[in-house]
């Protein structure tokens, strides 16, 4: 990244408070031009629970001062109950959070340095509430950039996929368990810090338990899902994600569903801002964002809306598990979405394990195949949402395919490119009332190495409805469609396209209550790919993204380095398998505020051979803050297990001030399974 120090306008920074109607004070950090009161500027709001003072400080100082130096006020606000803001946070995207967001916008407009126009920007949580607040239509909110977010909290968030319960649901709940236990900084809030901290420790609760109370698409998930009424959003939206991110599908639904001016961008990245994007290439997102803000907050014609509605990175083939810094490929574009020039290509599954182009006169085939996968299928799947690419990206799919039904095309005579959402139509039956199917689209290289391109899950009780699932009737044949994740991918000549089916995908998704045998009618099943013909002249004319830029980095002293590991541990003597994931953030000091921070999470997902009742997920977060003699530490642990009828959660929260443990709580919750 190129560091920019000389901006068109000189920047000042301040910490301040924004008061809500009930007296709650929200902590804000604002960067703005020093002459903004004489020459007011639009405000760009980022509204998060992730602690502006410390945990997002390094990221914030490279973007918000950059916007400020180009004639905006960069505004970073902690949601109530987080960072230095008053209150307690008890869940995601609460009505109170969204109402506070509207009040923040009203406060910004009332400031003498604000021109009256506001934009919202954010990745993940900040991308969610940008869309949700836009749907409330505050008059001053003129544009949104939403990154790595979703329009549908049930169908396409970290909790569920295809009606299946995701392993990331536990992982993410544990991350928030840790975050909600962190104290405010005494340097900002003074002697109130301990009372504020104890209030949070006592009141935030075990979010995982309340999430598990909602295993189908009920009103809990509909709240905050802007797909319920796309027309409620009346300001322009720029939706951005990455192929390695969990949220790429939402970009395409937003482009298809919104009626306002809109753009979409999908790169090769994981859950990162594009100027920090990995795998690369990272792009000049901050320059791109200025073109968007200048158009919609300042009324300047930057040409951004004259360009194609959608740009995506057409990925080229790579070996599985490759430790590449950049993903080979090229930028391609579509003037509109859905695109009329992307055409479906259908491939029929055969009893001979072939994938063959479907012809109109292909006769029906009633031959059947059976499948009952082991719990080992999924150990090499990576995470639903990649944060730390490449360790949490999928590995060689040959390690998975031994427990699957596999169908494969002949070696391709010429390259095939797809762009959009693959789908699979299956005719099948199950021997139990609750079952799932996992499907993986795979690029098979000439040396037979197998790289996952896309995948999809379906809880078969959700075959007709996520809101009203119904148990299967064993022995009855059903026809279902499984949507895979959107992708843009080239399959080179000489490679083959593989489709793999399994009845489990642990620990990416929680298994069915009992082992299941599926009976598949391959001759009545098909893979449908969204095929896109290359447009070389059009692609050559696309304007290039600029190289990444940012404001100067924060002064930071490394005390202990970071550490990451992913290990599959096979204990053959005891027939037990463990996937262990460690992400140690190390220890560092933020020099400007003399604050040392350390954090480490360990996750372990286990099963014993053939025993569905043995499946468990365990997480541990340890977090430390220290300044001189002031030191606080928190330790959170969560264990999730299940039997055929229930989920069981056991969790502990401990907090220390110095050597004294000042808080301890345990949870032991049993929650009935609801066709999951």
Image (cartoon, grey):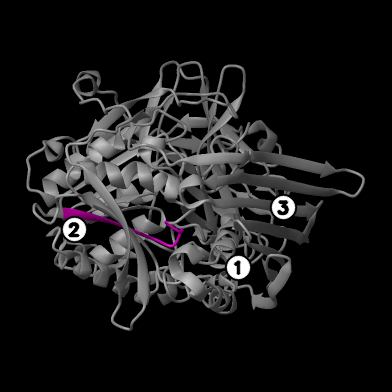
- Judge whether residue 236 can be spotted in this image: yes
Relative image position of residue 261 (x, y in whole percent):
15, 50
Q: Which residue is mark 1?
A: 473
- For the residue pair 152 and 558, the one nearer the viewer reads as 558
Residue lying at the far bottom in this picture: please name it: 22
Residue 604: numbered disc: 3
Q: Earlier in the sequence, mark 3 or mark 1?
A: 1
Image coordinates of residue 361 in percent, x first then y, are: 39, 35
Nearer mark to the viewer, of 3 and 1:
3
Q: Earlier in the sequence, mark 2 or mark 3?
A: 2
Q: Residue at x 39, y 49 (%)?
A: 148
Nearest to the observer: residue 298 or residue 442: 298
Residue density around tag 3, few if under 14, some if 14–19, many if 20 or more, within 10 Å:
many
Which label's residue is closer to the chain start, 1 or 2?
2
Is residue 361 visible in the rendered image? The answer is no
Dot 2 alpha-carbon crowd within 10 angstroms: few under 14, some 14 to 19, many 20 or more: many
Q: Is residue 46 magenta?
A: yes
> Could you tell me which quadrant the C terminus lies in?
bottom right
Tell me the SS state at disc 3.
strand
**What is the span of residues highlighted in magenta in the rendered image?**
42-52
Q: Is residue 421 above or below residue 199?
A: above
Query: What is the x, y in percent for residue 121?
Result: 29, 53
Quadrant in the rendering for residue 15: bottom left
Picture disc at residue 118: 2
- Asked whether 571 or 557 is in front, the reply is 557
Number of marks in picture? 3
At 36% from the left and 57% from the top, the residue drawn is: 126
| Secondary element at tag 1 | loop
Residue displayed at 45% across by 45% down: 271
């Amino acid at each position: 990244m190129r560091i920019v120090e000389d901006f068109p306008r000189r920047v000042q920074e301040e910490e301040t408070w924004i008061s809500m109607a009930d007296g709650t004070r929200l902590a804000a950090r604002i960067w703005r031009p020093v002459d903004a009161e004489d020459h007011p500027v639009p405000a760009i709001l980022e509204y998060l629970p992730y602690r502006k003072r410390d945990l997002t400080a390094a990221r914030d100082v490279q973007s918000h001062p950059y916007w400020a130096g180009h004639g905006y006020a960069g505004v970073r606000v902690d949601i109530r109950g987080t960072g230095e803001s008053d209150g307690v946070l008890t869940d995601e995207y609460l009505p109170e959070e969204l109402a506070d967001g509207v009040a923040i916008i009203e406060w910004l407009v009332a400031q003498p340095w604000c021109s009256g126009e506001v934009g919202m920007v954010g990745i993940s949580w900040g991308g969610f509430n940008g869309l949700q607040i836009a749907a409330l239509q505050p008059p001053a909110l003129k544009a949104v950039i939403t990154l790595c977010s979703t329009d549908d909290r049930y169908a396409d968030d970290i909790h569920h996929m295809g009606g299946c319960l995701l392993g990331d649901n536990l992982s993410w709940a544990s991350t928030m368990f840790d975050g909600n236990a962190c104290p405010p900084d005494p340097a900002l809030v003074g002697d109130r810090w301990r009372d504020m901290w104890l209030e949070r420790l006592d009141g935030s609760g075990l979010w995982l338990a309340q999430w598990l109370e909602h295993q189908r698409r009920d009103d809990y998930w509909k709240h905050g899902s802007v797909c319920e009424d796309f027309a409620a959003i009346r300001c322009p939206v720029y939706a951005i994600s990455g192929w390695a991110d969990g949220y790429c599908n939402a970009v395409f639904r937003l482009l298809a569903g919104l009626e306002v001016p809109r753009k979409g961008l999908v790169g090769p990245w994981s859950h990162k801002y594009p100027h920090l994007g990995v795998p690369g290439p990272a792009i000049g997102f901050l320059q791109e964002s200025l073109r968007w803000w200048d158009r919609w907050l300042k009324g300047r014609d930057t040409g951004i809306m004259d360009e194609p509605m959608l740009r995506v990175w057409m990925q080229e083939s790579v070996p599985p598990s490759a430790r590449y810094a950049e993903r080979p490929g090229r930028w391609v574009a579509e003037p509109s979405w859905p695109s009329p020039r992307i055409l479906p290509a259908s491939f029929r599954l055969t009893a001979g394990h072939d994938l063959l182009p479907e012809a109109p006169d292909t006769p029906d085939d009633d031959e059947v195949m059976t499948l009952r996968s082991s719990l080992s299928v999924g150990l090499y799947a990576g995470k639903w949402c990649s944060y730390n690419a490449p360790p949490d990206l999928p590995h060689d799919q040959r390690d998975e395919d031994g427990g699957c039904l596999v169908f494969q095309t002949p070696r391709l005579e010429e390259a095939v490119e797809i762009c959009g959402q693959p789908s699979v139509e299956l005719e099948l039956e199950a021997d139990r009332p609750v079952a799932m199917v996992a499907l993986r689209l795979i690029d098979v290289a000439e040396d037979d190495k197998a790289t996952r391109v896309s995948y999809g899950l379906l809880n078969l009780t959700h075959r007709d409805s996520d809101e009203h699932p119904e148990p299967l009737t064993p022995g009855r044949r059903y026809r279902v469609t499984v949507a895979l994740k959107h992708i843009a991918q080239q399959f080179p000549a000489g490679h083959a396209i593989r489709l793999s089916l399994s009845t489990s995908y642990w620990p990416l998704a929680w298994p069915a209550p009992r082992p299941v045998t599926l009976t598949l009618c391959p001759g009545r099943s098909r893979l449908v790919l969204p095929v896109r013909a290359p447009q070389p002249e059009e692609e050559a004319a696309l304007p290039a993204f600029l190289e990444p830029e940012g404001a100067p980095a924060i002064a930071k002293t490394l005390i202990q380095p970071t550490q990451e590991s992913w290990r599959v541990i096979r204990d053959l003597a005891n027939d037990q398998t463990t996937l262990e994931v460690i992400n140690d953030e190390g220890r560092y000091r933020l020099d400007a505020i003399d604050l040392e921070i350390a954090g480490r999470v360990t996750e372990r997902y286990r099963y014993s051979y053939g025993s569905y009742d043995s499946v468990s997920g365990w997480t541990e977060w340890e977090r430390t803050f220290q300044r001189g003699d002031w030191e606080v530490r928190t330790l959170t642990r969560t264990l999730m297990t299940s039997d055929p009828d229930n989920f069981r959660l056991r969790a502990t929260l401990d907090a220390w001030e110095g050597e004294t443990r000042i808080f301890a709580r345990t949870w032991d919750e049993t929650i009935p399974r609801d066709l999951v």
